[in-house]
Structure formats: C-alpha cells, structure tokens
Image (cartoon, helix red, strand yellow):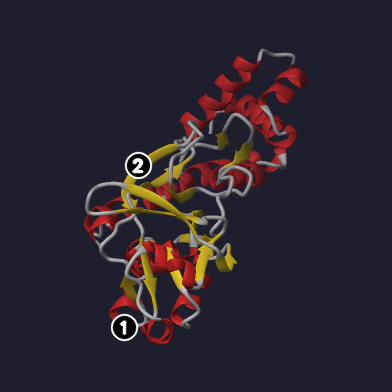
Amino acid sequence: MSYLNLPLLHVFHLVAERGSFQAAANELKLPRSSVSKKIRQLEEFVGQPLLQRSTRHLRLTDVGRSLLLGTGDLQSVLSNLDGLIDDMQTSLKGRVKISTSILMGQGYLVPMLKKFRCLYPDIELELNLDDRTVDLMAEKVDIAIRIGQLPDSSLIARNIGKKSWGWFASKGYLAERGDLNSPYDLVDHDCLVFRSEIYWPFQGSDGNTESIEVTPAIKTDSCRALVDMACEGLGVMMIDPQFIVKELNAGQLVPVLTDWKQPETSPINLVCVGERTKAVEAVWQFLLEEWSVWHLSER
C-alpha cells in the first residue's frame, strides 16, 4: 500500500475512535467536509464502505472493523495492510446481521438459508427475530425486513410483497363456542389481540367498511404466541394468512368471517442503510432474487 494512504488511515482511526466526523475534524483542525472526503478516498481505495452513516448514528462496517483492528499498531501497518486490503477486495467474508419479525423469519427467511450457506459458506449470518421495530444503526443491523410505511428516509428500501389480514380460529374452539356469522358476533367470543390492535376493520360485499371494537381475552406482543394460542383453541385472531400456511394446511386453524375482508394492506420491504460491504451486498441480492421467485403476495 502506498505511504500516501497512511494519512487517510490516521483520519479513519480518529473518526472511528471519536465516533463522529465532527469530533475528528475538530481534533485535526479541518473542515468536516475534508474529513468526509478523506474517508471516501480510503473507501474507494479499499473498494468497500468502512462506515455506515445516518442522521443520528455512525458505526463501523464489518470491513471497517477489520481495517481498524489490522492497522491499530502503526509499526505493523506496512506488513499487514497489503494482505488485509487484498483479502477485503477479493473475498466474500464477514458477518451480516438480518432483522425481521418472528413469523416472517420462521416462515420465509429460515427456509432460504441452506441455499445461501451453500453459495456463501464464508459469510457469517446473525438472525435477529423480533416483533418490534429495531433501529438498524443502533443495533448494528445490516438488512431488515420491515412491514408498513418507512418513516426513515435515510434507509434504502425494495418492496418484496404486501401484508394482508384475515380472521382465524381452531376447529375445536368453534365447536365449543359456535360459528361466527357476522363481525358483531365477536362480542360473544374470545378475541386474541396483537399489541393494541383492538379495532378490527371489516369490509362487506357492498364495499362499506366498519371498524369493530373488540375486547381482548388475551393480548400479546408476539405474533408467534398469537398463532400458538389460536391453535390451542383460546380464541379468534386477526393475522396475515401467508404467515400461517402450515397451520392452515394441517387443519389447526380455519378461516372465519369469510364473507368479509380486511380492506387494509401494508407493504413489505427489504431495507438497509446506504453503505453495504460486499458480504452485505451478496445477502441483499440473494434475498431479492429469492423473493422474486417466492413472492410473498402470491403465497
């Protein structure tokens, strides 16, 4: 590596250690734009992003962490750097963290992983299955699958499907409590509610929509628990049918109130921050290609 790149490394170390471009610029007595330019020059030389930026956070990419660790001792820089750069530029290695909801992860993501591991055995995957919306930068998430509108405009998003809803219960529950002929019958049934979604909208054949307020028998913040409780005969739930295909095929759950439909839909997006390492890019492209074949809205 050229000695001319050593000043860029010095700037990179300061930014990483101080946690911001402005703090490094203050220490170097340079404009913030000059520090940003030097980091871009180093990233162009490496061929991959070293830092991920948002309006609130700054964090090292997997490649950035490797470069920081491999060049920490200035005396070892010259002997280590060429090998580090060659490895970064030619190999698909590193950790990629993916975040999604529990049912989405279990139903769609996990079945894809064997094929991915065969294609990219040196990429380490970390799965974060959680029904809450995580902060990608704060929790060091590289790629997320998000349901609903995206308020953060700094995220890059690709639509991969849409979420819809229906109403379901177990045959055992219906045998015990009776069928539902109208949404108004819900007052006499146990309703299983996700978080605080106590208003269930129903659209009839005439196109009119009415929101029915339901009284939760059980409320949960876990979609997995919601499905399990419905299978156990604890009540009626509202959920996306594409997430319970296995339970429907097995006869554990059946649809109810089929003369009505839930009129709302939400987009399902693959999202990431702007800067992607080669390993993250490989996962990103793989997921997009897999979902183009196995499109969520057609399941």
Residue at (43%, 45%) from the top-left corner? 148
Residue at (50%, 65%) from the top-left corner? 223
**What residue is pinned by disc 2?**
158
Residue at (46%, 82%) from the top-left corner? 233
How many residues crowd mark 1 within 10 Å: few (<14), some (14–19), many (20+)? few
How many residues crowd mark 2 within 10 Å: few (<14), some (14–19), many (20+)? some
Q: Amino acid at mark 2?
A: Arg
For this view, does 63 lie left or right of residue 200?
right
Q: Amino acid at mark 1?
A: Ala
Residue 22 higher or lower than 299, as above or below: above
- The furthest residue to the right: 27
Q: Nearer the viewer, mark 1 or mark 2?
A: 1
CA–CA distance in space, label 1 to label 2: 33 Å
Tag 2, which secondary structure?
Answer: strand
Tag 1, which secondary structure?
Answer: loop
Q: Position of residue 274 (x, y in %)?
A: 47, 35
Q: Position of residue 237 (x, y in %)?
A: 44, 68
**What residue is pinned by disc 1?**
250
Residue closest to the eye, 235 or 163: 235
Q: Earlier in the sequence, mark 1 or mark 2?
A: 2
Q: Is residue 246 visible?
A: no
